[in-house]
């Protein structure tokens, strides 16, 4: 499960001098991070990555825009750029990023990217572990609904309490009919219980 950019940003602000240049992009989902200096490596992304860049290869505003365009196309989650003194993004490029809902943040070369990525990594890894545990608990609830010890504590840690009403939807192609029938039967059993 991805983490909203806002949740990452609040972990570093105001301790680190990282400024959000764009507006209303905090809801972007971040899956991981990459240091990418050159837009030739855009093809390596899967989508949802927060990119870190030193701006050493940004000789002009056109180069910045081309870089940003490639990563918007690859569905990157946002960009943090360390700018040298007196170097800024133009208002036009910031507005373009706003139109594309692509968050851009700036900082200085003195900002310790290593410390920031260490904090972000910890948050993303904990979130991924929680998602894995929740998926396991959901499978247990579906396949062994009477054995609440297999799933109830995980549900409650994720604010899914016993007395709440739930609706589970499964979307996708059904290639194995026997698995589908078993799952449907398990779900019906779970709903009849409550």
Image (cartoon, rainbow, N blue to C red):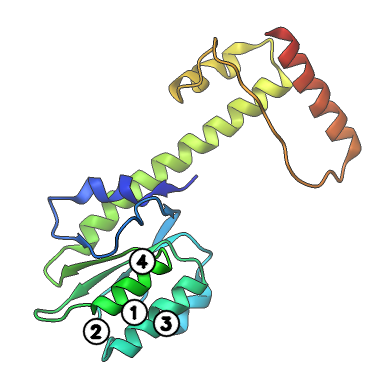
Q: Specify the label residue 39 is tagged with.
A: 3
As measured in the structure, the alpha-carbon distance from the residue carrying label 3 to the one carrying label 1 is 7 Å
Query: Which quadrant does the C terminus fall into?
Result: top right
Q: CA distance from mark 1 to mark 2?
A: 8 Å
Q: Dot 1: few (<14), some (14–19), or many (≥20) neighbours within 10 Å? A: some
Mark 3 Cα shell of 10 Å, populated few (<14), some (14-19), many (≥20): some
Image quadrant assignment for residue 66: bottom left
Tag 2 secondary structure:
loop
Report if the CB atoms under discs 3 and 1 are less than 8 Å apart. Answer: no
Among numbered discs 1 and 2, the one appearing first in the sequence: 1
The disc at residue 98 is 4
Q: Is residue 147 left or right of 11 when viewed as pictured? A: right
Number of numbered discs? 4
* N-term mark: 4 or 3: 3
Please tell me whether mark 4 or mark 1 is closer to you in this view.
4
Instruction: Find out whether the residues at labels 4 and 3 contact each other: C-beta distance under 8 Å.
Output: no
At which x and y percent is residue 97?
36, 70
Q: Position of residue 11 (x, y in %)?
A: 23, 46
Whether pointer 3 and pointer 2 mark residues with C-beta atoms closer than 8 Å, the reply is no
Q: Is residue 17 left or right of residue 51?
A: left
Looking at the picture, does residue 131 appear above or below residue 77? Answer: above
Q: SS class of the residue under badge 4?
A: helix
At 62% from the left and 27% from the top, the residue drawn is 138
The dot on residue 88 is none
Residue that carries the numbered disc 1 in the rendered image: 37
Disc 4 vs disc 3: which is toward the camera?
A: 4
Q: Which residue is mark 2?
A: 56
Q: Are marks 1 and 2 in contact (CB under 8 Å)?
A: yes
State how far apart marks 4 and 3 are (Cα): 20 Å
């Amino acid at each position: 499960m991805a983490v909203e950019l806002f949740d990452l940003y609040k972990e570093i602000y105001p301790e680190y001098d990282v400024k959000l240049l764009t507006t209303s992009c905090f809801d972007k989902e971040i899956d991981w991070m990459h240091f990418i200096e050159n837009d030739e490596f855009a093809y390596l992304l899967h989508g949802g990555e927060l990119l870190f860049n030193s701006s050493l290869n940004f000789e002009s505003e056109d180069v910045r825009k081309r870089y940003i365009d490639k990563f918007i196309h690859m569905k990157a989650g946002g960009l943090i750029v360390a700018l040298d003194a007196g170097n800024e993004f133009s208002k036009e490029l910031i507005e373009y990023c706003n139109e594309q809902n692509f968050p851009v943040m700036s900082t200085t070369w003195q900002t310790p990217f290593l410390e920031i990525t260490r904090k972000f990594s910890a948050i993303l890894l904990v979130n991924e572990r929680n998602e894995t545990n929740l998926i396991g608990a959901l499978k247990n609830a579906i396949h062994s609904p009477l054995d609440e010890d297999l799933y109830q504590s995980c549900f409650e840690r994720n604010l899914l309490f016993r007395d709440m009403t739930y609706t589970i939807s499964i979307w996708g192609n059904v290639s194995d009919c026997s698995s589908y029938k078993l799952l449907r039967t398990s779900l019906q059993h779970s709903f009849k219980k409550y």
